[in-house]
Amino acid sequence: MNVISNIEDLRTLAQRRVPKMFYEFADSGSWTESTYRANEADFKNILLRQRVGRDLSQRSLKSPMLGIDMAMPVALSPVGLQGMLRADGEMHAAKAAAAFGVRYTLSTMSICSLEDIAAHTRAPFWFQLYVMRDKNFMLSLINRAKEAGCDALVLTLDLQVIGDRHKDARNGLSTPPKMTLKNILNMMSKPAWCMGMVGTSRRNLGNIMGHAKNVDNMTSLSSWIASQFDPSLSWDDVEWIKAQWGGKLIIKGILDAEDARRAQQAGVDAIIVSNHGGRQLDGAPSSIAALPPIIDAVGANTEVWLDSGIRSGQDVLKALALGARGTMIGRAFLWGLAAQGEQGVTKALDIIYKELDLSMAFCGHTKVDQIGRSTLIESTIPRLF
């Protein structure tokens, strides 16, 4: 592909270059995938209001998230197993984000560890934490995140139980992949991916293997993970984690206005409206449809960001117009990572930046803080009720 003009071009390249098991881990939802599809479709239905006759010569996309100056109001979402889409993938993505001037978020379920990211990029990054049964291990992760220089903790609340992800089950998703004939043949058709994996020692969950108690091989790792997601999670856990962390706390996985108000009462610094990319509750609303009532519920005192479904700068613009003060991208940068490594993540960010800049200009704006509901055709805004 000689010219890459949009995120879909990167997705096409990623599909060619990554084994099916890991490509479909990224490109799938739970059950019927209706929420996964709605995340994108509902953005497409929102129309922008074109304005003309305005001075557009002094445009800037710079905008703060959590008081941190960003090149644009976009951060990279936490996504597990990036290092299986591209060898040492988390390090590539973190370096690209730092160079571009946006924040990277490392997942608990990453291949590269907190220490790996800290050693390979000088910029601060964020760390995403799951609530687990082993509170001592959670505390050790929090302390390791502090030592690694993380300046915010992203607490994900929508994974008390794991959604039924049919493609992952059919593919026998594991890291490293099981050496079945089917997997071997598929990997042999992706020679560049194979060469990358041969050249790295990072093929397991780096934040867990060798750190959690009695977890030192694949069998013990799989058993430990299966037992750790905590269905008894409550807001008391959130308050305990906030006290242990002591810094900026972001809550991810909010889709309901009442839950957003409860998060606000817990004193969190930002709320991420997210349905886990459509990989948890199938049949839940798209994130963009859930955004307006949450904005109405919490007002201006708590930052609200939008995650799930963003594939373009226009999607970012639409989320900002509906009141989000920041956005997070997952698959959009994953396709770049899988296709071209660090260069591909930079390309994905470049694409979104350019699309946001031009679309903002066509709507008559020169700065992010000018974007509001008047940027949209009101009748096309999705409503839950």
Image: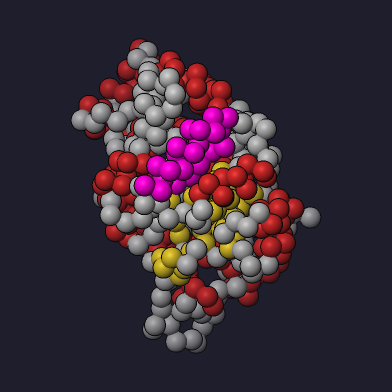
Looking at this view, is 97 or 30 the one in front?
Answer: 97
The total number of labels drawn is 0
Residue 219 horizontal/vertical position (percent)? 43, 15
Residue range of the region highlighted in magenta in the rendering: 127-147
Task: Give the residue at x 32% y 56%.
Answer: 123
Q: Is residue 186 magenta?
A: no
**Prevailing secondary structure class for the magenta stretch in the rendered image:** helix
Task: Give the residue at x 49% y 38%.
Answer: 139
Q: Is residue 143 magenta?
A: yes
Residue 189 horizontal/vertical position (percent)? 29, 25
Q: Is residue 334 above or below residue 372?
A: above
103 with respect to 262 (left or right): left
Residue 88 horizontal/vertical position (percent)? 29, 38
Task: Give the residue at x 54% y 33%.
Answer: 135
Task: Give the residue at x 71% y 64%.
Answer: 296
Residue 64 horizontal/vertical position (percent)? 46, 68
Would residue 80 be seen by someone viewing this image from the given angle?
A: no
Q: Is residue 326 above or below residue 235?
A: below
